[in-house]
Amino acid sequence: MFRKIVGLCTVFILVFTGCGAASREVAGSKAAQEEQSAAVISVPDEVNGIAVNESTAVVTDMVVDVFSEPNVRSQRITQVIYNQAVSILSEEGSWIRIAAADGGIGWVRSKFIDRNISSINGRSYTHRIIITGKEKSIFSDPSGGITVKNAVMGTVFYAFNNSGTAYEVYLPDNMTGWLRGSGIIHVGLDAGVPMTSGEDFAASALKLKGTSYLLNGLSAMGMDSPGMIYICSKINGLNLPRDLKGQIHYGEEISLDSIAVGDIVFLGESEDINNISGAGIYLGNGQYIHASRALGYVRLEGLNESGSDGKPLFARRIFR
């Protein structure tokens, strides 16, 4: 929950030199000052499930793998994405051990973590902007210009300026950029993402068709089925568990005869829930989408077929 401080906001004018359009530092432009004067200073107790304190940091790269050990050859346990809040637990050489919002705890390279959290905390903001497309470019100006950064589905930014066609958002490293066009939603600072529908959930998953399979991935850079289900649920107003064991108990179990668009389909060779081999999202017309471990990418398969990762056994309804 946000503690709001509403009133006259002092705007500090930062004088800078040598910064091109693609790497503009936060400055006191007239438009930004006008937007900030009507904004809310956000001092959140937590951001996306991560408590805001002296251990909080943000992710500075588009997608960062989280490993079980401080070694890139160890197991990937999850991913964190750009501007995501994480909690720093410890440090070892060029590695930092973090806790992520999805419950994952592991190691990331320290070069991808910044303790300066002003992109998510302590400044004047007007909205939260959430990426709902597979991937979205952040530009240097509201009409386009140079690409400053790319962000993947589920990335969250805090906006402080609105040109009418684009939102200016704070970025890590004391930078700003503009988001425009489709593939984004904006919500209030205190508001959660509105719950949508099974149809919208399925449509989000369909945007990820063709994405490479990556064990414990959850982004356009690679994902497994639980990661696909997790990230699509978040942008549609639900907060499902990150792993298959948690997802198999979420919602209401239904038979395949009663399946509807947006239901989660569970795959396996037997109906023993301890031996479920995968999951997907039902799209309608007898098809579901999943990240096929056997074939290596996100694809559509038939509900009445023996699929590449096992046959569909049952479903769970998460939208009502």
Image (cartoon, helix red, strand yellow):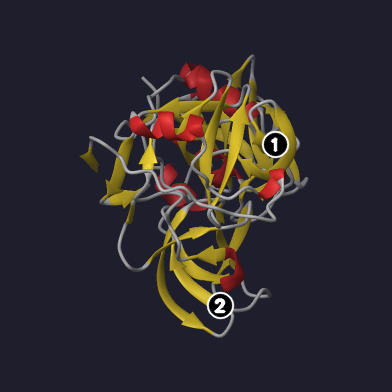
115 left or right of 17?
left
Binning the other alpha carbons within 10 Å of mark 1 as few (below 14), some (14 to 19) or many (20 upward) gives some
Tell me, yes or no, if residue 260 can be seen here. no
Q: How far is disc 2 from disc 1 in space, using C-alphas?
A: 40 Å
Q: Where does residue 140 sit, x and y in percent of width and height? A: 67, 38
Q: Earlier in the sequence, mark 2 or mark 1?
A: 2
Q: 84 or 246, which is in the foreground?
A: 84
Q: Quadrant of the C terminus?
A: top left
For the point 68% across and 75% down, the residue is: 73
Mark 2 vs 1: CB contact within 8 A = no
Q: Where does residue 203 sit, x and y in percent of width and height? A: 59, 22
For the point 69% across and 25% down, the residue is: 143
Q: Quadrant of the N terminus?
A: top left
- At mark 1, the secondary structure is loop
For the point 74% across and 43% down, the residue is: 297
Binning the other alpha carbons within 10 Å of mark 2 as few (below 14), some (14 to 19) or many (20 upward) gives some
- Answer above or below: position of 100 versus 199: below
Q: Where does residue 251 sit, x and y in percent of width and height? A: 36, 33
Q: Which numbered tag is attached to residue 307?
A: 1
The type of residue carrying mark 2 is Trp
Mark in front: 2 vs 1? 2
Q: Where does residue 2 sit, x and y in percent of width and height? A: 25, 42
Residue identifier under label 2: 95
201 left or right of 118?
right
85 left or right of 26?
left
Q: 59 or 286, which is in the foreground?
A: 59
102 left or right of 179?
left
The type of residue carrying mark 1 is Gly
Question: Most extreme residue toward the top, as rendered?
Answer: 285
Q: Which numbered tag is attached to residue 291?
A: none
